[in-house]
Image: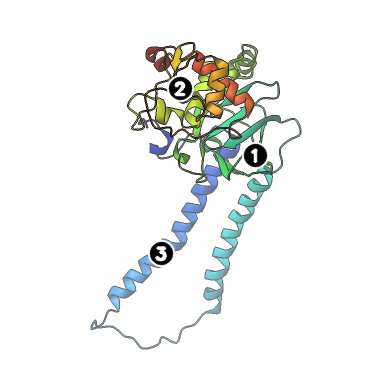
């Protein structure tokens, strides 16, 4: 976490008109709350001191009673807070009704990463590039447990539910790169389920799409999967598990416990990921890797293997981070 991280800032940047209006709503309601509560606590403190036990004070009833005053201090705060209820309801209804010309981006949450797919087919993992000045509608679902996509820069979040689509829409008006998070505790690595959203000028966005920027490059996309599935936690140098290093594995000769020697090609890597107990490695090490059969989709498995192909040395692996 760097000093410029959103979590360490007093107030995250607002990149849409709705985000700015939301900030204004929060600020105005905070001011109203202070105006209504501070005088009450000041009066409580004054009367507690002025009429404390043993103090010289006239405690006999004054006989003064005003129904108008009593009605006023109930009705005026009620009407003032009602204004904010209507204001907040307007923003809520607006957030649930995207315009028909919105650019639809598919979003899938899973333990522990976000996958995004643009209308033209390009996909991203844990990163999202979008144009400014155009309504964006995120069509969201979860592949496993309940997640929640949170974009602080637009002041919006929505649950990602299994077997049910939810939507979130906004229109950014400022360029820049900002954080996105999962704001619903979803398991062991919930804290690392995040990424970045980059808002771009429409021309830059189209250029980015044309040059396949959304693909992140096979190596970068594979690296994201490598970390999301927990491979890095075991196979990286310095891991307490001390699993075999994957640097330089692809294309090399691997000795097996039964005395055979095989080449670590794409087919062998695929089978080893899906069935780790098959083709046990020589050396007598304990087999603790779980099977990923049924857990990793075929397209993601292919992307992960593409990453392992481009993982020739420790130095090259560091360059993909």
Name the residue: 56% across, 22% down.
Answer: 270
Q: Which residue is mark 1?
A: 141
The spot of residue 95 in percent (x, y) is: 66, 42
Quarter of the view holding residue 281: top left
Q: How many marks?
A: 3
The residue lying furthest to the front in this view is 259
Seen in the picture, residue 206 relative to 165 is either above or below; the reply is above
Seen in the picture, residue 188 relative to 291 is either above or below; the reply is below
Q: Residues within 10 Å of mark 2 (few under 14, many from 20)?
A: few
Q: Nearer the viewer, mark 1 or mark 3?
A: 1
The front one of 267 and 116 is: 267
Do residues under tags 1 and 3 come within 8 Å of each other at their CB atoms?
Answer: no
Measured Cα–Cα span from mark 3 to mark 2: 82 Å
Looking at the image, tell me whether mark 1 or mark 2 is earlier in sequence order.
Answer: 1
Name the residue: 52% across, 27% down.
Answer: 278
What quarter of the picture does the C terminus occupy? top left
Q: Which residue is mark 3?
A: 39
Is label 3 in a helix, a strand or a loop? helix
Measured Cα–Cα span from mark 1 to mark 3: 47 Å
The spot of residue 256 in percent (x, y) is: 45, 20
Q: Residues within 10 Å of mark 3 (few under 14, many from 20)?
A: few
Q: Which residue is mark 2?
A: 258
Left or right of 36 on screen, residue 303: right
The spot of residue 294 in percent (x, y) is: 61, 34
């Amino acid at each position: 976490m760097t000093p410029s991280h959103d979590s360490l800032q007093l107030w995250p940047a607002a990149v849409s008109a709705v985000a700015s209006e939301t900030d204004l709503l929060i600020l105005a309601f905070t001011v109203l709350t202070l105006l209504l509560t501070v005088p009450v606590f000041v009066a409580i403190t004054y009367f507690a001191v002025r009429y404390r036990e043993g103090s010289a004070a006239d405690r006999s009833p004054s006989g003064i009673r005003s129904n108008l005053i009593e009605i006023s201090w109930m009705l005026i705060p009620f009407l003032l807070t009602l204004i904010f209820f209507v204001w907040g309801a307007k923003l809520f209804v607006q957030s649930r009704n995207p315009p028909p010309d919105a650019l639809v981006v598919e979003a899938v949450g899973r333990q522990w990463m976000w996958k995004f797919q643009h209308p033209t087919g390009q996909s991203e993992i844990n990163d999202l590039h979008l144009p400014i000045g155009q309504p964006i509608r995120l069509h969201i679902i979860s592949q496993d447990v309940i997640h929640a996509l949170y974009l602080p820069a637009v002041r919006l979040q929505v649950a990602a539910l299994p077997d049910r689509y939810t939507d979130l829409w906004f229109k950014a008006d400022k360029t820049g790169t900002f954080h996105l998070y999962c704001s619903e505790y979803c398991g062991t690595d919930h804290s690392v389920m995040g990424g970045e959203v980059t808002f771009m000028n429409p021309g830059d966005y189209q250029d980015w799409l044309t040059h396949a920027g959304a693909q992140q490059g096979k190596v970068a996309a594979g690296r994201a999967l490598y970390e999301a599935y927990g491979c890095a936690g075991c196979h990286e140098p310095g891991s307490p598990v001390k699993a075999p290093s994957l640097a330089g594995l692809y294309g090399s000769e691997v000795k097996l416990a039964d005395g055979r020697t095989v080449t670590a090609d794409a087919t062998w890597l695929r089978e080893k990921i899906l069935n780790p107990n098959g083709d046990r490695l020589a050396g007598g090490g304990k087999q603790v890797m779980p099977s990923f059969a049924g857990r990793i989709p075929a397209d993601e498995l292919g992307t992960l293997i593409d990453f392992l192909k481009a993982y020739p040395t420790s130095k090259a692996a560091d360059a993909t981070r």
